[in-house]
Amino acid sequence: MPKDVIIACDFAGKEETLAFLDRFEEEQLFVKVGMELYYAVGPEIIREIKKRNHKIFLDLKLHDIPNTVGKAMKALSKLDIDMCNLHAAGASKMMRAALEGLTGEDGKRPLLIAVTQLTSTDQETMQNEILIDRPLDEVIIAYAQNAKEAGLDGVVCSPLESGIVHTACGKEFLTVTPGVRFADSEKGDQSRVTTPSRARELGSDYIVVGRPITAAADPVAAYRRCTAEFLG
Ligand code: C5P
């Protein structure tokens, strides 16, 4: 099972992003492009990153009716990305349509990962506003199982949830986990955080790391420290 550190490139524009990536010279990275950067720059940012030979997780979290998500995924499949995602709350029919749209004529496709519950949603919000009256862990496991049954490759979750997801869905089912901080660094707005080495012990397959790398005085050194701790 390939494990890797995904750098969250949460930059506002193209120049800033490419200047950041150019610091790494020949190293092949796995980078996450989120809504902010993709909506600001468009598909060009994907082509520019690919020109530099990096892998891409396009984090757009699709959620709409099955037909729309299927067609949107077909458009994204032309972009040469390595991983993308959707909301498991869109349910099985939507997830299957997404897979179908994403799969090329040669049968190949990027990894497709489901968001279970956003980490910004706590038990109280889920109960009072989304009206889901079940424990958060139970919801995460059920959504992960739905994603697995629909044929998806894994879920985005907290490193603290990697264990329960692997127990419910098997070791091969990927856990892609943000909320990672070095033991000696700022948490920022993340509340439930773990270190890269703890994420490895908990069984995360990919860790998504933003500011501890992008805002470091020496991002290349921070990235190397992160991979050394996570990959062991
Ligand atoms: O800078 P930081 O390491 O907190 O960045 C984490 C990245 O992972 C950000 O791009 C954030 O949007 C994303 N993310 C998250 N929690 C989730 C899903 C995505 O922090 N549940």
Image (spheres, rainbow, N blue to C red):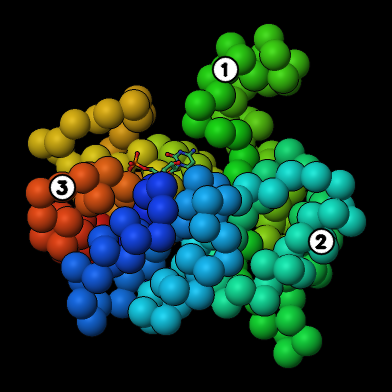
Residue type at numbered disc 3: Ala
Question: Is disc 2 surrounded by few (<14), some (14 to 19) or many (20+) residues within 10 Å?
Answer: many
Residue 11 image label = none
Question: In this rendering, would 42 be left or right of 161?
Answer: right
Relative to 126, does residue 1 appear above or below in the rendering?
below
Few, some or many residues within 10 Å of mark 1 (<14, 14–19, 20+): some
Q: Quadrant of the C terminus?
A: bottom left
- In the rendering, at what x and y percent does residue 212 appear? 22, 45
- Give the spatial CA distance, label 1 vs label 2: 31 Å
Residue at 73% x, 90% y is 106
Identified at 34% across, 26% down, the residue is 189
Label 3's element?
A: loop
Q: Secondary structure at mark 2?
A: helix
CA gap between label 2 and label 3 equals 38 Å
Amino acid tagged 2: Gly
Asked if residue 167 can be seen in this view, the reply is no
* Quadrant of image for the N terminus: bottom left
x and y, in percent, of residue 37 in the image: 48, 52
Q: Are marks 1 and 2 in contact (CB under 8 Å)?
A: no
Label 3 beta carbon within 8 A of ligand 1? no
Residue 123: mark = 1
Residue labelled with disc 2: 70
Q: Earlier in the sequence, mark 2 or mark 3?
A: 2
Q: Earlier in the sequence, mark 1 or mark 3?
A: 1
Between 92 and 142, the residue placed more toward the observer is 92
Can see residue 14? yes
User: Compared to 110, does 105 lie above or below?
Assistant: below
Ligand 1, by image quadrant, is top left
Rendering coords of residue 201 (x, y %): 29, 50
- According to the picture, the residue beneath numbered tag 3 turns out to be 216
